């Protein structure tokens, strides 16, 4: 009996940890690894930056907790049904998440192209416009011909970028320890209100991972497992983000004066005097950009290749080329404004929308509905989504 209980607890922890790692992998991708997001949303606001980052991770994981509980308890089958359940009786408001999601996808692909192009420009002095075209063509080719291969290799790429970033964070913090100590000792004037807004905004645009998380979170059997998973995710995401921010705080004056705020981590890596770290990071970051771009585009292509407007095209391969080209043209156009502006304005405005339609609703109405619904089905057999709706309303 004791062995069975130990095994059950072990399986419960393993499942919770696996789902936590999915959120960590989604968060700690190319955008995180460049240091651009951390600089724009936290570092420029001084010593309170690590605190605001922790608040953002708390908001994100608490929101996803409510999403997974609502999704699993009602046996829902899509993120559309999830948001209909959240907004019920105003079910049609679920279209707001559709707008948010696809706008974020296009911005994310634009950021991938802009980030990879900036990397080629900084490292190999390739003119930015030519770099954008080169990356766009590569992504298009990989999406059409090699998506499955890239998808299989994405885990290896992510591990590579995280390992190199961990080394960079440790070395970077060590190199600027006196400057970092001074920042936290002096505690200069900071805009706390703006910092808190940025924490909400960051959680808002990171909520684009909800469709992925509810899909992976189906393995979590009960609300306790969901809570356990999100606690683990909160801890590991907070540690990674805070380490990045502390390093960037120490180097902030130097990389801004050098005009290297687009890819600050790349600049820091070049200043550490360790070529093997620089090239490992450089290669892993580029591959991570390509992996993120291909898997994101391919996911959208699979959805839109079935739309009615393309019903006249019988060849599925041609359909995918048409959809991929359309997404790529839009994303390449967005990438021409540069990574800084995409992160500041594209992610920023979608973050505001995310606050209004995801973060606040799930942490208020969603949490209330979940508590009410779980109490109503306590001791009863799980119901399907339609019966769940009737039971609650």
Image: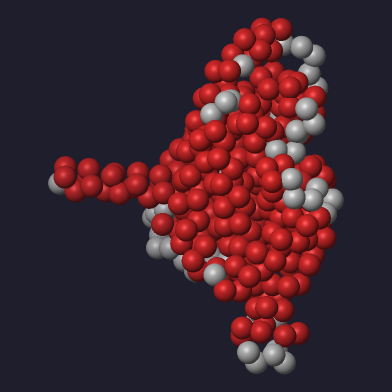
The location of residue 190, given as percent across then percent down, is 78, 18
Vertical side of 110 occupied by 323: above or below: below
Vertical side of 373 occupied by 164: above or below: above
- How is the protein colored in the picture? secondary structure
* Residue found 55% across the figure and 68% down from its top: 147
* Residue found 57% across the figure and 26% down from its top: 273
Residue 188 found in image quarter: top right
Vertical side of 242 occupied by 308: above or below: below
* Residue found 74% across the figure and 68% down from its top: 327
* Residue found 60% across the figure and 67% down from its top: 142
The location of residue 264, given as percent across then percent down, is 69, 33
Position of residue 281 in the picture relative to residue 260 (left or right): left
Position of residue 310 in the picture relative to residue 9 (left or right): right
Please identify the quadrant where the C terminus is shown: bottom right
Judging depth in this view, the residue of 119 and 88 nearest the camera is 119
The location of residue 392, given as percent across then percent down, is 58, 59
Asked if residue 205 can be seen in this view, the reply is no
The location of residue 299, given as percent across then percent down, is 60, 67
Judging depth in this view, the residue of 43 and 290 nearest the camera is 290
Judging depth in this view, the residue of 370 and 341 nearest the camera is 341
Asked if residue 290 can be seen in this view, the reply is yes
Judging depth in this view, the residue of 353 and 171 nearest the camera is 171
Residue 103 found in image quarter: bottom right
How many numbered circles does the render carry? 0
Position of residue 369 in the picture relative to residue 12 (left or right): right
């Amino acid at each position: 009996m004791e062995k069975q209980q130990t095994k059950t607890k072990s399986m419960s922890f393993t499942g919770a940890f696996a789902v936590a790692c999915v959120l960590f992998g989604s968060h700690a991708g190319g955008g995180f690894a460049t240091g651009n997001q951390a600089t724009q949303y936290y570092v420029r606001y001084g010593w309170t930056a690590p605190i605001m980052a922790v608040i953002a991770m708390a908001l994100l994981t608490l929101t996803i907790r409510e999403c997974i509980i609502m999704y699993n308890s009602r046996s829902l089958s899509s993120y559309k049904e999830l948001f209909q359940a959240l907004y019920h009786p105003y079910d049609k408001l679920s279209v707001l998440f559709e707008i948010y999601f696809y706008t974020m996808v296009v911005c994310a692909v634009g950021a991938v192209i802009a980030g990879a192009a900036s990397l080629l420009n900084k490292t190999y002095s390739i003119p930015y416009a030519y770099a954008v075209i080169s990356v766009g063509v590569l992504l298009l080719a990989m999406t059409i011909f090699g998506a499955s291969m890239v998808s299989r290799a994405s885990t290896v790429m992510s591990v590579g970028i995280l390992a190199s970033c961990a080394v960079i964070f440790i070395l970077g913090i060590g190199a600027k320890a006196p400057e970092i100590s001074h920042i936290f000792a002096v505690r200069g004037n900071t805009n706390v209100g703006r910092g808190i807004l940025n924490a909400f905004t960051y959680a808002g645009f990171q909520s684009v991972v909800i469709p992925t998380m509810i899909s992976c979170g189906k393995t979590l059997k009960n609300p306790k497992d969901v809570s356990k998973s999100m606690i683990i995710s909160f801890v590991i995401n907070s540690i990674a983000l805070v380490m990045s921010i502390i390093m960037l705080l120490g180097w902030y004056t130097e990389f801004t004066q050098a005009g290297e705020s687009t890819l600050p981590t790349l600049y820091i890596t070049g200043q550490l005097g360790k070529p093997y770290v620089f090239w490992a990071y450089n290669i892993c970051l580029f591959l991570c950009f390509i992996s993120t771009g291909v898997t994101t585009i391919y996911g959208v292509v699979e959805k839109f290749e079935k739309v009615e407007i393309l019903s006249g095209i019988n060849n599925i391969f041609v359909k995918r080329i048409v959809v991929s080209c359309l997404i790529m043209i839009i994303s390449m156009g967005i990438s021409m404004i540069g990574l800084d502006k995409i992160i500041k304005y594209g992610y920023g405005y979608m973050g505001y929308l995310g606050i209004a339609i995801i973060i606040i609703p799930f942490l208020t109405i969603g949490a209330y509905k979940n508590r009410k619904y779980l109490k109503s089905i306590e001791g009863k057999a799980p119901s399907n989504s339609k019966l769940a709706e009737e039971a609650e309303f």
